[in-house]
Amino acid sequence: MPRYAQLVMGPAGSGKSTYCSTMVQHCESLNRSVQVVNLDPAAEHFDYDVMADIRELIEVADVMEDDSLRFGPNGGLVFCMEYFVRNFDWLEECLGHVEDDYILFDCPGQIELYTHLPVMKQLVEQLQQWEFRVCGVFLVDSQFMVESFKFISGAMAALSAMVALEIPQVNVMTKMDLLSKKAKAEIEKYLDPDMYSMLEDSASLLQSKQFKKLTKAICGLIDDYSMVRFLPLDRSDEESVNIVLQHVDFAIQYGEDLEFKEPKEVEEDRPSTFDEYFQDRVDE
């Protein structure tokens, strides 16, 4: 039987550890067994048990204190991850060989790990050799995404990870529960965006013709190929958490030997899940 893995990615502070904690609690309520592996050698604390912790192998603090290396925080983290890649046997021993495992990998937030360094790609390939079906879950803080240009930046970061890792990917806007009512109403347009309309709305802010052309080209890439779409995640709303989990399960076909799963659909004459989510909060 296959094994299943979520690579939980995203910038620092996007809520990766909180996402893992939320998913563990939600799956426990569904009587599903989910394990977490911490792959952030700079992590300080988290409120869930882990089946493996990279800090048992190497820590950023130890690397930074080594006089022969003289690394700062960023270089120290990259060194730790490259050391981790050379010691995949440690991870294999921690994971064991249990069938039907479902594991969340809480990954570091440095974007270079998902763009021009091969570390995460090598991890994906190794997990696939161990018969894992892998899905990327890319998190972006919704409080950061309430402006058009910030949204484009976040979308490009998600797209970079998607292209580099070559695995199914679910993009999630986190911390929806922290937004004001006005911000929640405003952010709905970013979940399934019309990039050209977004560009027109912000055209007056672009002074340079060259940057206008560049921004238009980027918007065209995202819009024409429908490559980036976001799901809202409100950790206080079980339905919101369940929708995200359903999309990930569908991407890796979790439990396909039992029954075929698809993301939750709604009837055409009913408002979309997104519409219901935001209408409920506008009414509050």
Image: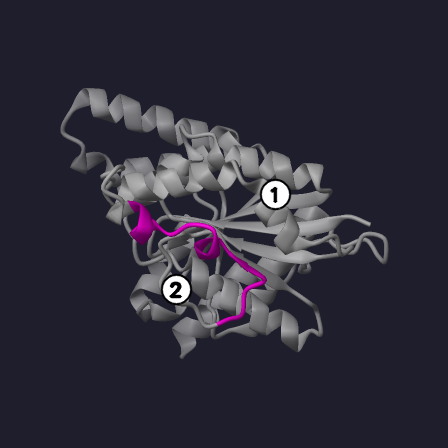
Number of residues whose C-alpha sits closer than 10 Å to that of mark 2, classed few (under 14), some (14–19) or many (20 or more):
many
Look at the image and say whether residue 254 sits in the magenta stretch: no
Task: Locate residue 260 relative to residue 62 in the image: left or right.
Answer: right
Q: Quadrant of residue 143?
A: bottom left
Colour setting: one colour
Q: Position of residue 26 (x, y in %)?
A: 59, 72
Q: Which mark is residue 21?
A: none
Q: Position of residue 18 (x, y in %)?
A: 44, 65
Residue positioned 44% across, 62% down in the render: 17
Q: Which mark is residue 175?
A: 2
Q: Nearer the viewer, residue 3 or 201?
A: 3
Residues under labels 2 and 1: Cα distance?
Answer: 36 Å
Number of residues whose C-alpha sits closer than 10 Å to that of mark 1, classed few (under 14), some (14–19) or many (20 or more):
few
Residue positioned 71% across, 57% down in the render: 101
Q: Nearer the viewer, residue 233 or 181?
A: 233
Report the quarter where the C terminus lies.
Answer: bottom left
Q: Nearer the viewer, mark 2 or mark 1?
A: 1
Q: Is residue 218 above or below residue 105?
A: above
Q: Which mark is residue 89?
A: 1
Residue type marked 1: Asp
Q: Nearer the viewer, residue 59 or 258?
A: 59
Q: Position of residue 90 (x, y in %)?
A: 58, 47
Is residue 203 shown to the viewer in this render? yes
Look at the image and say whether residue 51 sits in the magenta stretch: yes
Q: Position of residue 75 (x, y in %)?
A: 29, 38
- Tag 2's secondary structure? loop
Write down the region rendered in magenta: 48-63
Residue type marked 2: Lys
Q: Residue furthest front?
A: 68
